[in-house]
Image (tube, grey):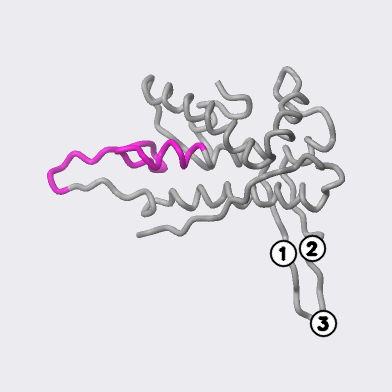
């Protein structure tokens, strides 16, 4: 079971996965792997190890520098108005747990032979039915939401490098949906 995300996080909310006993086991495996991979890429190995060591028994960060990137935030400190022209870019992170849910959903659903829909996972059984490509039901949009939070957290750590001197993250970019 993951530290920040559980299979229950995919029952309701922005990313839903219909779950059976078998798919729940598969989803748990994806959660365990992706939590580590995504956070190591986001922070780099040294900062990731410090972040994990900072967690309490409920997997909540204890020091302010880790609380700042764990929780949701909106950063518009680089946006300014020059003679009526807005320059710069604001960043929003929905927090590490939500970011992980979007990446886990992508990783789990992209290779499934079934379609994950708002009502759960469905499989067409009629003769003339085809399995729908994930991009047609918004799968890349969920991934890209994760990327936006990931980028916001990375930017926050870069902009506050004195608080995150161990930062050594890897850039992650949005994907383009192929319809």
- In the rendered image, residue 106, in percent from the top left (x then y), is placed at 46, 42
Q: Residue furthest bottom?
A: 83
- In the rendered image, residue 73, in percent from the top left (x then y), is placed at 74, 47
First in sequence: mark 3 vs mark 1? 3
Q: Is residue 97 left or right of residue 112?
A: right
Q: Residue at coordinates 52% horizontally, 29% vertically from top-left?
A: 33
Q: Are marks 3 and 2 in contact (CB under 8 Å)?
A: no
- In the rendered image, residue 9, in percent from the top left (x then y), is placed at 54, 31
Location of the N terminus by quadrant is top right
Q: Residue at coordinates 33% horizontally, 42% vertically from top-left?
A: 115
Q: CA distance from mark 3 to mark 2?
A: 16 Å
What residue is disc 3 on? Answer: 83
Q: Residue furthest right?
A: 162
Task: Work out whether 125 lies above or below 1.
Answer: below
Q: Are marks 1 and 2 in contact (CB under 8 Å)?
A: yes
Q: CA distance from mark 1 to mark 2?
A: 6 Å
Residues shaded magenta? 104-128
First in sequence: mark 3 vs mark 2? 2
Location of the C terminus by quadrant is bottom left
Is residue 44 covered in magenta?
A: no
- In the rendered image, residue 110, in percent from the top left (x then y), is placed at 39, 42
First in sequence: mark 1 vs mark 2? 2
Q: Nearest the camera: 37 or 91?
A: 37
Q: Are marks 3 and 1 in contact (CB under 8 Å)?
A: no
What residue is disc 2 on? Answer: 78
Q: Give the secondary structure at mark 1.
A: loop
The crowd level at tag 3 (other Cα within 10 Å; few <14, some 14-19, many 20+) is: few
The crowd level at tag 1 (other Cα within 10 Å; few <14, some 14-19, many 20+) is: few
Q: Is residue 135 left or right of residue 145?
A: left
What residue is disc 1 on? Answer: 89
């Amino acid at each position: 079971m993951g530290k920040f995300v559980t299979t229950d996080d995919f029952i309701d909310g922005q990313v839903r996965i219909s779950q059976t006993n078998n798919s729940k086991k598969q989803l748990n495996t994806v959660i365990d792997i992706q939590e580590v991979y995504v956070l190591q890429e986001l922070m780099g190995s040294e900062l990731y190890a410090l972040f994990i060591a900072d967690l309490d028994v409920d997997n909540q960060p204890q020091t302010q520098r880790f609380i700042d990137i764990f929780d949701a935030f909106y950063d518009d400190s680089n946006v300014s108005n020059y003679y009526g022209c807005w320059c710069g870019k604001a960043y929003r992170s929905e927090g590490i747990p939500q970011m992980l849910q979007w990446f886990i959903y992508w990783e789990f659903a992209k290779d499934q032979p079934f379609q994950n829909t708002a009502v759960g996972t469905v499989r067409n059984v009629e003769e003339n039915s085809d399995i729908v490509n994930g991009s047609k039901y918004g799968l890349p949009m969920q991934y890209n939401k994760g990327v936006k939070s990931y980028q916001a957290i990375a930017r926050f750590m870069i902009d506050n490098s004195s608080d995150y001197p161990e930062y050594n993250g890897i850039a992650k970019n949005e994907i383009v949906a192929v319809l």
